[in-house]
Every structure is written in structure tokens, then in C-alpha cells.
Amino acid sequence: MKKSLFIPLALLISGNALAATDHYVLRDGDYVRHLKVTKTGDDFTVSANVDYDANKDGNSTHCSESISGKAKSTGENQLVLKKHAESEASFCELKIQLSPTGAKIEESKDCDNFTVSQCHFATEGKELIKVK
């Protein structure tokens, strides 16, 4: 009985030990961006979200968008997430450059199909700070 409980528990623990997750955050004015990168073996899963909240002249403008999926490594510390828009024949492509202290994100123009108005995943050259 003890062996039958030990084996599934050992497999569960060993599988989680191989996964590593890093979080990156940038608060820039009315924007808050969050990036989560999980590496399991040679596979990467990326989740990016952006929140924008501005109160201009008493009119509140708010949007919150997210995108996630499997990413491919395109070089040392470089990831690309490509996501197909369900209602369009286009792809949103996020190019992510990781560093020991943070990450920068560039987005393709087709990412406008995934976001509304002022919400953008791109960091415009600014670095999301790695959360420890």
C-alpha cells in the first residue's frame, strides 16, 4: 500500500521540480503589464496581460487584455509567442527578450485584433522588472 502511494507522489513532485516560472511586472503611468514565463524541460508557456485605467476629464477609460500560449525559443533569451485571432486570418506575435533582471516585449501590428483602444502588450523599449 505504501509503494502505491509513494510512486504517484514521487512522479508529481519530480514533474513540478522540472518546471520553473518567472514573473515580470511593469507599472508605467496608467499601464500595468504582467508577463509569466514557465519553462518545463525545453517547452515554454507564456502569459501576458495588460491593464490600462485612465480617468480623463471625469471619463474613465479602462481595458484589460491577456494572451497566452506555447512560445518558441528563437535564440538565447528570446521567445516568440504566436496566437491566431479566432475571428481574423491574422496572428498576434509577441517577441520577448529576457534578461537576468527583466524582459522587453514587442508586438506585431496584428495584435490590435486581440486588444482594444489603448491596451498594448508592447513595452515600448521599457523593461518589465523580474519579480523575485
Image (cartoon, grey):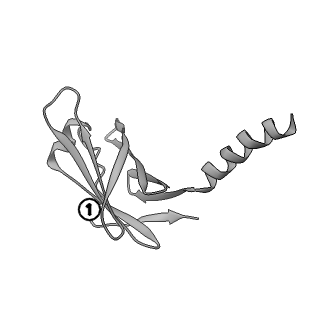
Q: Is residue 24 left or right of residue 84?
A: right
Q: Quadrant of the C terminus?
A: bottom right
Q: Residue furthest bottom?
A: 100
Q: Secondary structure at mark 1?
A: loop
**Residue denoted by label 1:** 124
Q: Quadrant of residue 4?
A: top right
Image location of residue 8, percent across then percent down = 71, 39
Q: Quadrant of residue 106?
A: bottom left
Q: Quadrant of residue 7?
A: top right
Sort mark 1 into few (<14), some (14-19) or many (20+) by Cα contacts within 10 Å: few
User: Foreground: 90 or 65?
Assistant: 90
User: Foreground: 107 or 18?
Assistant: 18
Relative to residue 1, is residue 110 depicted above or below? below
User: Which residue is at a point 15% across and 37% down the rendered structure image?
Assistant: 90
Residue 99 seen by the camera? yes
Image location of residue 86, percent across then percent down = 23, 28
User: Foreground: 38 or 34?
Assistant: 38
Relative to residue 11, is residue 114 depicted above or below? above
What residue type is disc 1 on? Glu
User: Which residue is at a point 26% across and 62% down the rendered structure image?
Assistant: 124
Residue 33 seen by the camera? no
